[in-house]
């Protein structure tokens, strides 16, 4: 059994390794700046940043930006040594709490996913994903948003990669009715569900409000089987993620998923509901 909880003082969900990289590169900027006799305010003005913003980057509380590295490299005569640090500062493609699950999903032969409030990442359009990631709280910088949206869309290659894996999705009606972005974004998202739901290795079912069991209110559940026939369950929360490979938790989540799926509409009925909701927007 694996269980992991996100932590750390940086609210963006970066891993401890990423935060260490921030602190190291920020510290190098400060050392080079002081060695060259460049004041922090001077550097901030040249880069077009606020003094406190540069201080946060030098102290490792924020990721040093490419622009700051470029300006600091020039002003301090570092000859590319500071700029080289950007390679270690690229945004991580996934929040730290879900990294372990992503590695297992990539090896899956079956994925059974229940989602109560949002469209699952494997089924999201680019616009829908951008609305979610770009409006996360606290807000992420644009570079991180772009990287995470791109990573989410790359994950979707799993739906069509060979050998084909089997995917079963159960979506609570709330996830279909909650308008993410605007009506145009949501209409395209529902139309995308209708299209993907016709693929022979993908089934999409709707769990109506009126038949949803109490277990459906406790959060998302993802069940995965790998090519080695290892089984896992992933439960994702707002700031924590837990991955189970055996034991009582795996059994409980499997039972809950089965109970939820039994109350869902058939694939055919679900397709009609999704099309109707798209037409209403």
Image: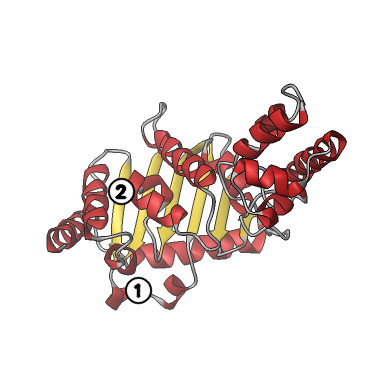
257 and 41: which is toward the camera: 41
Crowding at dot 1, Cα within 10 Å, few <14 / some 14-19 / many 20+, comes out as many
Q: Give SS at disc 1.
A: loop
Q: Residue 145: which disc?
A: none
Which percent across, then down, holds residue 65? Answer: 62, 41
Residue 46 vs 206, above or below: the answer is above
Residue 212 got which mark? 1
Report the residue marked by disc 2. 203
Mark 2: few/some/many CA within 10 Å (<14, 14-19, 20+)? many
Relative depth, front residue between 198 and 137: 137
Q: What is the x, y in percent for residue 271? A: 20, 54
Residue sitting farthest toward the right:
35
Q: Earlier in the sequence, mark 2 or mark 1?
A: 2
Q: What is the basis of the colouring in this image? A: secondary structure
For residue 216, which quarter of the picture? Answer: bottom left
Q: Compared with residue 120, is residue 277 higher up or lower down, i.e. above or below?
A: below
Residue 143 picture location, percent across and down:
52, 42
The residue that appears at 26% across and 54% down in the rendered structure is: 185
* Residue 41: percent from left, percent from top: 72, 49
> How far is disc 2 from disc 1 in space, using C-alphas?
19 Å
163 to the left or right of 2: left
Q: Nearer the viewer, residue 148 or 27?
A: 27
Q: Nearer the viewer, residue 208 or 77?
A: 77
Quadrant, the C terminus: bottom left
């Amino acid at each position: 059994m694996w269980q992991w909880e996100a932590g750390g003082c940086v609210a963006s969900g970066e891993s401890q390794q990423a935060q260490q990289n921030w602190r190291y590169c920020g510290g190098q900027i400060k050392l080079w700046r002081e060695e060259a006799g460049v004041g922090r305010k001077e550097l901030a003005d040249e880069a077009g940043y606020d003094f406190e913003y540069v201080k946060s980057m030098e102290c490792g509380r924020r990721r040093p930006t490419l622009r700051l590295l470029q300006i600091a490299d020039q002003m301090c005569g570092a000859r590319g040594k500071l700029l080289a640090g950007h390679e270690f500062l690229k945004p991580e493609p996934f929040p730290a709490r879900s990294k372990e699950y992503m590695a297992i999903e990539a090896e899956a032969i079956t994925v059974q996913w229940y989602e109560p409030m949002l469209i699952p990442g494997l089924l999201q359009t680019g616009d829908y994903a951008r609305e979610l990631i770009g409006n996360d709280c606290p807000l992420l910088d644009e570079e991180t948003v772009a990287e995470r949206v791109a990573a989410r869309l790359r994950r979707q290659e799993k739906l069509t990669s060979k050998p084909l894996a089997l995917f079963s999705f159960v979506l609570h009606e709330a996830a279909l009715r909650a308008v993410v972005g605007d009506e145009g974004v949501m209409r395209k998202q529902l139309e995308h569900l209708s299209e993907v739901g016709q693929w022979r290795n993908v089934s999409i079912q709707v769990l109506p409000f009126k038949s949803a069991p109490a277990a459906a209110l406790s959060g998302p559940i993802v069940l995965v089987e790998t090519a080695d026939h290892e089984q896992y369950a992933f439960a994702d929360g707002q700031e924590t993620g837990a991955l189970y490979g055996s034991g009582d938790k795996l059994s409980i989540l499997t039972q809950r998923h089965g109970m939820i799926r039994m109350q869902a509409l058939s694939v055919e009925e679900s397709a009609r509901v999704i099309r109707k909701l798209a037409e209403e927007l």
